[in-house]
Image (spheres, rainbow, N blue to C red):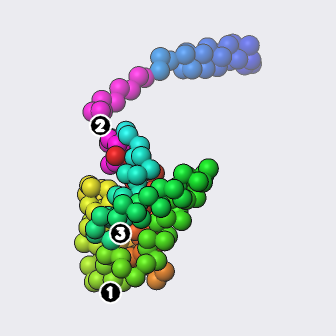
Amino acid sequence: MLDFKKIFYAIGLTITLVSCAKEKVYVYELADVAIAQPGIAKPNVKTNTQYISIAYTDVFGSTVSQSELSDLEQAYLSFADKTVIEDLIIRNFLNESSTNLPSESDMLADVSAFVTTAYNRVYNRQPSEYELWYHVNEINESSVVTPELFYYALLTSNEYRQY
């Protein structure tokens, strides 16, 4: 006859010994990687005058006249929400016929060069590999992206407000 008590104790002892085994410790030796975001090294905010005059130069390729700068600065100061007036100023600049922006056919002829030139012109830096890939892909896949729309996105970004 089987002694169930002994079998029960033997099974319990086996389970206890197996379950109390020391856990293995795994050590993964990975090298630290420094990640830097382009444009993050711009800690200063442009003044109103700097923002308007630099945006004008980036869009038209020439300096803004003192009287026009004064008028734009007055309009800028009259708005409480600066993002609204910045949006209106940039839209006004881009809607004028005398802009110095590439045409849509030039943009589509070499999208990568267009994006790189725009970044150099507006941000004074090269686009990262991801930025370049994303914008080239977006322009090639979307029929609504125009040079004016692309420059609008760059000129109204947070990075553009910094230097």
Q: Confirm whether residue 12 shows in the render.
A: yes
Residue positioned most to the front? 67
Tell me the amino acid under the disc marked 2: Val
Residue 43 coordinates in the image, percent (x, y): 37, 39
Nearest the viewer among 57 and 134 is 57
Q: Residue at x 34, y 46 (%)?
A: 163
Residue 144 coordinates in the image, percent (x, y): 48, 80
Q: Residue at x 47, y 61 (%)?
A: 71
The disc label shown at residue 9, or none: none
Quadrant of res 137: bottom left
Q: Confirm whether residue 107 shows in the render.
A: no
Q: Which residue is mark 1?
A: 105
Sooner in the amino-acid sequence: mark 3 or mark 2: 2
Quadrant of res 117: bottom left
The residues tagged by marks 1 and 2 sit, at their Cα atoms, a distance apart of 41 Å
- Sort mark 3 into few (<14), some (14-19) or many (20+) by Cα contacts within 10 Å: many
The disc label shown at residue 59, or none: 3
Q: Residue at x 36, y 83 (%)?
A: 104
Q: Are marks 1 and 3 in contact (CB under 8 Å)?
A: no
Left or right, residue 26 beside residue 116: right
Q: Which residue is mark 2?
A: 33
Nearest the viewer among 162 and 70 is 70
Range covered by the magenta-colored residues: 24-42
Tell me the amino acid under the disc marked 1: Ser
